[in-house]
Image (tube, rainbow, N blue to C red):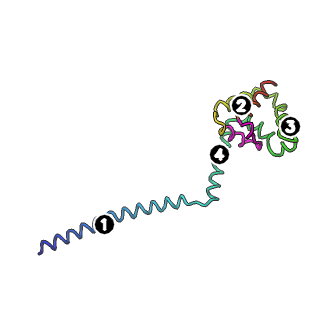
Amino acid sequence: MIVLLELIAVGVFLLLAVHLLFGFRLFGARQIEDRAAKARDISPAQSAAEHLRELSNAQADLKARYPVVFAMLGGYLNAHSISEAGGLESAVKQMVADWTPRREEVKTELVRLLAENASEEEVRAIVLSCADATFEEEGYRNWLIWLLGRFNAA
């Protein structure tokens, strides 16, 4: 009888030890999972602010990589300049005329931009980062190739 009680006592002790050991580990894992879930649960405004920060950083990197393109397109293809020139075509003509003295810089940077960014989406992102004009019908790569042709002909 004493042996049976000792076996039951050892079994209870082992069961208690296993429960405590695994219980604390699972509890600790739950706390880590809860903290990770709370970190993911950010408000839409916080998410938008984070994405805007990332966009600003990416635009600054692009501006540093293609300064001539950003200066040229940003200076002439913004909403104010387009409306002041009387439309997009007039603004582009004025831009080409004003940047013709620096055409070698423009051509070099446009060629580099087109060579480094093979997809339409990449070129679209660059143009939309520095200009208010959209070239959805023509395609952004095609429009930059056309613009490069204008500087080659000048």
Is tag 4's residue or tag 3's residue first in the polypeptide sequence?
4
Quarter-of-image position of residue 129? top right
For badge 4, the amino acid type reads: Asn
For badge 1, the amino acid type reads: His
For badge 3, the amino acid type reads: Ser
Q: Where is residue 32 in the image (x, y as percent from the top left)?
A: 45, 60
Residue 151 in the figure: left or right of residue 113: right
Residue at the disc numbered 2: 110
Residue at the disc numbered 3: 90
Is tag 3's residue or tag 2's residue first in the polypeptide sequence?
3
Label 4 environment density (alpha carbons within 10 Å; few <14, some 14–19, many ≥20): few
Give the alpha-carbon distance from disc 1 to disc 2, as whole Å: 68 Å
Q: Position of residue 89 (x, y in %)?
A: 84, 37
Residue at the disc numbered 1: 19
Is tag 1's residue or tag 2's residue first in the polypeptide sequence?
1
Residue 102's place in the image compared with 91, above or below, is above
Label 1 environment density (alpha carbons within 10 Å; few <14, some 14–19, many ≥20): few
Q: What stretch is highlighted in magenta?
A: 123-140
Residue at the disc numbered 4: 57
Residue 29's place in the image compared with 3, above or below, is above
Give the alpha-carbon distance from disc 1 to disc 4, as whole Å: 51 Å
Give the alpha-carbon distance from disc 3 to disc 2, as whole Å: 21 Å
